[in-house]
Amino acid sequence: MRKVIAAMKVSVDEKVEGSAGHADWVEAWSEDYGLMPQIDACVLGGGMYPGYEQYWTSIQNDPNTPVWITGKAPSPAEIEWARFAAETPHYVLSSTMTATRWPKTSFVRGIGEIADLKQQPGKDIYLVGGARTVASLIDAGLVDELRLIVYPLIAGVGKALFPTTEHRHRLELREVKQLEGGRVSLIYAIGNGAG
Ligand SMILES: NC(=O)c1ccc[n+]([C@@H]2O[C@H](COP(=O)([O-])OP(=O)(O)OC[C@H]3O[C@@H](n4cnc5c(N)ncnc54)[C@H](OP(=O)(O)O)[C@@H]3O)[C@@H](O)[C@H]2O)c1
């Protein structure tokens, strides 16, 4: 069965966004987890999708103009993700949203549909976020792997990665790598049995 892989950029205190409403310590929103060769679908929560679509649409339309979250021109890796994202089906978990500008985006109305997606043939699925969606899909036993890039900072006030996780989940460390700028890449397998 294809795997669901959640991957997020967090501070040491596990914040996924700061008081500004985004993780302003992240210098680029490129897919830095090495997932592109192994995925052919993305799952996102309705909370983050509008900002995500706006961010990557602006890079797709004009890769030379500074983008609104980072305030900088997109990096080559961001331009690569913008192209990949345009060709890749995106599934947005939302009971309320109906409109998207991306032809390959569709809305899923409950986590049962994510379970169905896992059963379909295909490559792995990248769970892009946000925090509540990652927490609820982990609690539902649908996430197989967690990839974190930990930034060297205590963010303080902000949105935590697992604020709504209800159950204990055992993790098995698969890889640790030190990255540029004091960041650390962690890959965990998630045990979906009794913990
Ligand atoms: N640091 C990072 O790497 C990173 C990555 C991605 C996102 N983020 C941050 O995460 C923030 C968004 O996270 P969020 O937690 O506010 O929202 P979210 O997880 O993106 O979306 C939550 C929404 O998903 C829908 N939903 C439907 N069924 C659900 C279920 N079973 N469980 C959870 N959600 C369900 C609901 O929308 P309806 O009300 O429409 O049903 C819910 O309001 C963004 O602002 C972004 O800054 C950070």
Image (cartoon, rainbow, N blue to C red):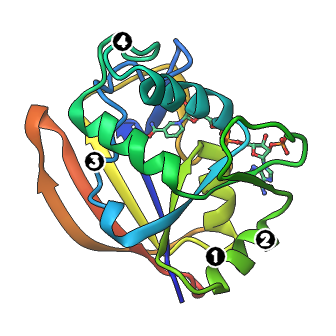
Pointers 4 and 1 in contact (C-beta within 8 Å): no
Q: Amino acid at mark 1?
A: Gly
Secondary element type, mark 4: loop
Crowding at mark 2 (Cα within 10 Å: few <14, some 14-19, many 20+): some
- Sequence-wise, the earlier of marks 1 and 3 is 3
Q: Closer to the camera, 148 or 109?
A: 109
Mark 2 → mark 1, Cα distance in angstroms: 14 Å
Q: Which residue is mark 3?
A: 32
Q: Which residue is mark 2?
A: 113
Pointers 2 and 4 in contact (C-beta within 8 Å): no
Q: What residue lies at 65% left-to-right and 84% top-to-bottom?
A: 120
Residue 21 visible? The answer is yes
Mark 1 within 8 Å of ligand 1, using the beta carbon: no
> Number of numbered discs present?
4
Query: In this picture, is 124 found above or below 179?
Result: below
Query: In this picture, is 180 found above or below 122?
Result: above
Mark 3 → mark 4, Cα distance in angstroms: 21 Å
- Sequence-wise, the earlier of marks 4 and 1 is 4
Q: Which residue is mark 4?
A: 65
Mark 3 → mark 2, Cα distance in angstroms: 27 Å
Q: Amino acid at mark 2?
A: Glu
Q: Amino acid at mark 4?
A: Thr
Crowding at mark 3 (Cα within 10 Å: few <14, some 14-19, many 20+): some
Q: Which residue is mark 1?
A: 141
Pointers 1 and 3 in contact (C-beta within 8 Å): no
- Sequence-wise, the earlier of marks 3 and 2 is 3
- The residue mark sitting in front, 4 or 1, is 4
Q: In which quadrant of the rendered view does residue 131 lie?
A: top right
